[in-house]
Amino acid sequence: MSSFPGRNIYSIPTQFTSIPYLTEANYPKWKESIEIFLGCMNLDLALEKEEPPKPSDTSTESEITHHDAWVNSNRMCLKILKYVIPETMKGDMPDTENAKEFLIEIENQTKKVKKAETGSLLYKLTSASYNGQGNIREYIFGLIDVVSKLRGLGQNIEDEFVVFLVLNSLPPEFDLFRINYNIQKEKWTLNELVSQCVQEEERLNYNAHLVTSKQGLSKNKKRKQHIEKQAVSSIADSQPQYENQSKEKEAMKVIY
């Protein structure tokens, strides 16, 4: 059971609080709730019947009573309809004093919003791309959330299509992983997709870590070899100096 934010539900009939808040996805349910409420309150005449002719001097008492009842129904229906739609929708509504026309316009406005929302979500889904940053589990769940919203808007999107979109949105590092899936007969559920992608990302990260470690060891080995080579070269360069000093000492002994 839904209520309307910021409104005093104690000032209106209890049945009124059972009307769901209008969104682009729930118009049929919302309209049904409105019609049931107005019917229970005996206020739905203006939605069921066209406006009768205005009374004249020749009008019967029954005709006058019927017209007055329609005017009262129309007036209350308009007030209630305007009360239970979002503020953002009111600015786009035409200035009409006919409740039935106003209800039709609400439906038209809802369809426009629904169409725009659907287009935005479809673009987000089909243009998604995983760049390896962050967490692949969160990335896939984000796309699944988009799919859920699209299904709520009446779009029939199969799990197999979602699996296809996700796999094709992965970076080149997942090419072999993608090929292996395409050649197998079994089709993954969305939960299996998440699990398999997480495992593959962990495998790729582990392999990348091994490569980095080996490169680090190779660099350290080369650096050590370079240092040793420099040390040997330094010793070799200093050897003639030591030999000359020894010869000079021998010559001095002979002189003295």
Image: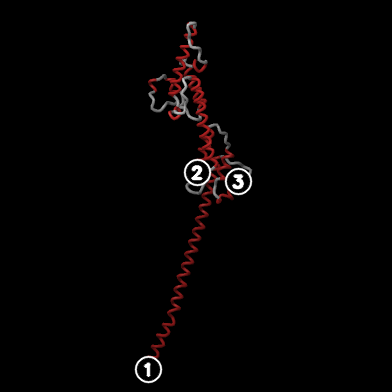
Query: Around disc 3, counting alpha carbons within 10 Å, would you say few (fewer than 14), some (14 to 19), or many (20 or more)?
Result: some
Name the N-terminal-most of marks 2 and 3: 2
Is residue 2 positioned above or below 169 on the image? above
Q: Earlier in the sequence, mark 3 or mark 1?
A: 3
Give 53 or 28, whichever is nearer the viewer. Answer: 53
Amino acid on which the number 3 mark rests in the picture: Tyr
- Label 1 Cα crowd, 10 Å radius (few <14 / some 14-19 / many 20+): few
Nearest to the eye among marks 1 and 2: give it: 2
Query: Please, is residue 31 above or below residue 174 in the view?
Result: above
Disc number for residue 181: 3
Q: Which mark is residue 139?
A: 2
Q: Quadrant of the N terminus?
A: top left
Label 2 SS: helix
Q: Secondary structure at mark 3?
A: helix
Image coordinates for residue 120, horizontal then vertical, percent = 51, 37
Q: Relative to residue 118, is residue 2 depicted above or below?
A: above
Q: Which mark is residue 46?
A: none
Which image quadrant: the C terminus?
A: bottom left
The residue most toward the front is 57
Specify few, some or many for label 2: CA neighbours under 10 Å numbering under 14, 14-19, or 20 or more: some
Q: Position of residue 194 (x, y in %)?
A: 53, 43
Q: Check the image and tell me how it is coloured.
A: secondary structure
Foreground: 19 or 159? 19
For mark 1, give the secondary structure. helix
Give the residue displayed 46% in from the left and 67% down from the top.
223
Residue bearing mark 1: 255
Disc 2 residue type?
Tyr
Instruction: Using residue 55 as the reference point, say whether residue 155 is left or right of it.
Output: right
Where does the image place residue 201, in percent across and percent down from the top left? Answer: 52, 49
Q: Earlier in the sequence, mark 1 or mark 2?
A: 2
